[in-house]
């Protein structure tokens, strides 16, 4: 498989009034093309910081990030962060507008995405008129519109109730697979991590250290909801549960 | 669409309530004026210092016939509009500066708070000396009263921009101008619009205050002149015009607010 990007000996230290806080300590891993990788760990550890560094919002204190030439990263935030004063369509093309890429080809792609994922009839409506799941889908379309090669998802389903969470994670997973994207997702939901991912990276609490990497191999892997029914699922769940528990 | 009996009953009840409220509001006004007139006519209150509705009416009629009525209203209205427009545009501009330069905002914050709590009327005499006894000093007076509060309200609107949305814009590598145009200003828009109402009442206070201190026309002038020559009919007429005018201006701003706010 093709190594899409690599993080090497990444370190992040924050300086505050009360002293230094070590958020991330010596983290190294690679992401391969077409993979779906989950990062799990206790909340409040430096998982989101890791993403912020990857997207360039923050500087690493030490270490390097190598991204394959010409590959781009798309970032999907914890909440949908839709602009309530813009229509669904205008929200979808926000990224293109900001980055000056409003070409005919890109707009057609947005149309295709809106149509394929059931939002085209709402184009002129406003986000307040959408359900939680639709908002999440729209946020994903906004990210996909820029045609990123790698998607970083920061707890994308945390704002949803349990029912829609299962449904939406299924949706989002299908979309990502259909558009052939590589995805890295932060979550603190063990079941979600196992049911969606090819690999799970387990992080410890602060300072964030990469504790273990699990390759998830499920017999007859299909949709995330179906994956939860496989017999390996509960074994992985037990293992991961104990691991996270031990590190808290 | 066909309405169910219950729905009709509900709507009927609502209509009745609205009518009931309106009826009593009218009654209060009528009773107030009627009582005032009666008390004044029967010398229970001294009409020389309390005036009476009929005297106010005659005074207003006199002002109208001589053409003075609209000269005074127009003067006050013009001053209010100028000070209002200056206040919101300067307030918006300065708030934007404060938001763009957080360090500057931190430095200047205690001074703004100090100015905000200072009774601006106290500066009146100085303003007259500095700007001269003319229309300018009225505008300055009104600006003093409406500007600080506008700056603070609009600035708070800017600061309240959702952190996650800022993060999103940053991850798209938006520049500072795009940040303002696409996120910060639209997200503070409703706060800006609702600050208009606050601003107009402040401006009105400022204008009347200014007219009290220095003026040759305007409603404030009418009132202060009436007091000086002890013509209480004129004073009460001035107050009456003021009530009507402020209600009218407030409704205008409410209308503008409705037109400009998001959906």
Image (cartoon, coloured by chain):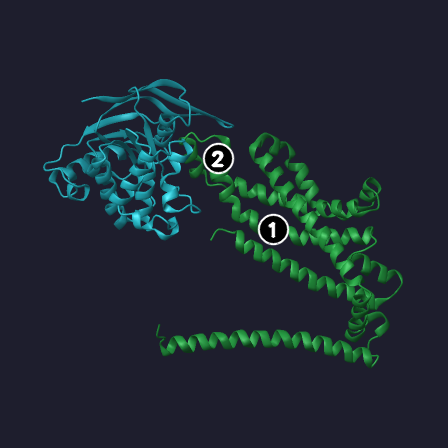
Label 2 marks which chain's residue?
A: B
Q: Residue, x 51% and y 33% (percent of image)?
A: B177
Outermost residue, right side: B229
Residue located beneath label 2 in the image: B179
The colour one sees for chain B in the rendered image is: green
Label 2: few (<14), some or many (≥20) within 10 Å? some
Residue B91 against residue B234 in the figure, above or below = above
Cα distance between the residues tagged 2 and 1: 24 Å
Q: Which chain is cyan?
A: A
Residue A127 against residue A108 in the figure, above or below = below
SS for callout 2: helix
What percent of the width, then of the height, locates residue A206? 36, 29
What percent of the width, then of the height, locates residue A66? 31, 19
Res. A160 in view: no
Label 1 marks which chain's residue?
A: B
* Badge 2 or badge 1: first in the primary sequence: 2
What percent of the width, then of the height, locates residue B169? 43, 34
Outermost residue, left side: A220
**B82 relative to A136 in the view: left or right:** right
Residue located beneath label 1 in the image: B196
Res. B248 in view: yes
The image quadrant of residue A54 is: top left
Q: Residue, x 71% and y 45% (percent of image)?
A: B143
């Amino acid at each position: 498989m093709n190594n899409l990007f690599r993080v090497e000996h990444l370190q992040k230290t924050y300086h505050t009034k009360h002293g230094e806080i070590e958020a991330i300590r010596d983290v190294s891993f690679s992401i391969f093309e077409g993979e779906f990788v989950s990062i799990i760990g206790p909340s409040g550890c430096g998982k989101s910081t890791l993403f912020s560094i990857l997207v360039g919002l923050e500087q690493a204190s030490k270490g390097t990030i190598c991204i394959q030439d010409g590959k781009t990263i798309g970032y999907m935030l914890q909440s949908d962060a839709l602009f309530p004063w813009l229509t669904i369509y205008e929200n979808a093309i926000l990224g293109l507008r900001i980055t000056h890429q409003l070409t005919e080809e890109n707009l057609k792609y947005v149309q295709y995405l809106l149509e394929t994922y059931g939002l085209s009839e709402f184009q002129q409506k406003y986000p307040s008129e959408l359900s939680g799941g639709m908002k999440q889908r729209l946020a994903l379309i906004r990210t996909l519109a820029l045609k990123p090669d790698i998607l970083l998802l920061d707890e994308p389903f945390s704002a949803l109730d349990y029912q829609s969470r299962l449904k939406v994670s299924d949706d989002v997973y299908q979309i990502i697979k259909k558009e052939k994207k590589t995805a890295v997702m932060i979550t603190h939901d063990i079941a979600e991590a196992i049911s969606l991912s090819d690999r799970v990276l387990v992080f410890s609490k602060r300072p964030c250290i990469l504790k273990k990497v699990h390759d998830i191999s499920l017999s007859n892997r299909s949709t995330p909801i179906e994956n939860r029914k496989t017999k390996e699922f509960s074994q992985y769940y037990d293992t991961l549960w104990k691991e996270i528990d031990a590190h808290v | 669409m066909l309405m169910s009996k219950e729905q009709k009953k509900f709507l009927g009840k609502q209509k009745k309530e609205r009518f009931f409220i309106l009826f009593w509001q009218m009654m209060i006004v009528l009773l107030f004026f009627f009582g005032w007139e009666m008390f004044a006519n029967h010398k229970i209150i001294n009409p020389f210092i309390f005036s009476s509705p009929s005297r106010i009416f005659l005074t207003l009629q006199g002002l109208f016939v001589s053409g003075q009525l609209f000269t005074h209203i127009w003067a006050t209205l013009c001053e209010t509009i100028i000070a209002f427009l200056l206040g919101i545009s300067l307030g918006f501009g300065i708030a934007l500066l404060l938001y763009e330069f957080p360090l500057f905002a931190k430095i200047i914050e205690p001074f703004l708070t100090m100015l905000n709590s200072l009774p601006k009327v106290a500066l009146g005499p100085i303003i007259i000396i500095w700007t001269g006894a003319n229309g300018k000093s009225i505008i300055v007076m009104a600006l003093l009263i409406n500007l600080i509060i506008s700056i603070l309200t609009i600035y708070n609107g800017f600061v309240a921009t959702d952190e996650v949305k800022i993060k999103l814009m940053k991850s798209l590598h938006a520049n500072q101008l795009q940040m303002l145009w696409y996120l910060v200003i639209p997200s503070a828009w409703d706060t800006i619009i609702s600050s208009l109402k606050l601003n107009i009442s402040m401006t009105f206070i400022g204008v009347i205050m200014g007219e009290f201190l220095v003026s040759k026309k305007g409603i404030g002038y009418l009132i202060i002149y009436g007091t000086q020559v002890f013509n209480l009919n004129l004073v009460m007429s001035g107050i009456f015009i003021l009530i009507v005018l402020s209600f009218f201006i407030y409704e205008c701003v409410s209308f503008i607010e409705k037109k400009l706010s998001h959906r």
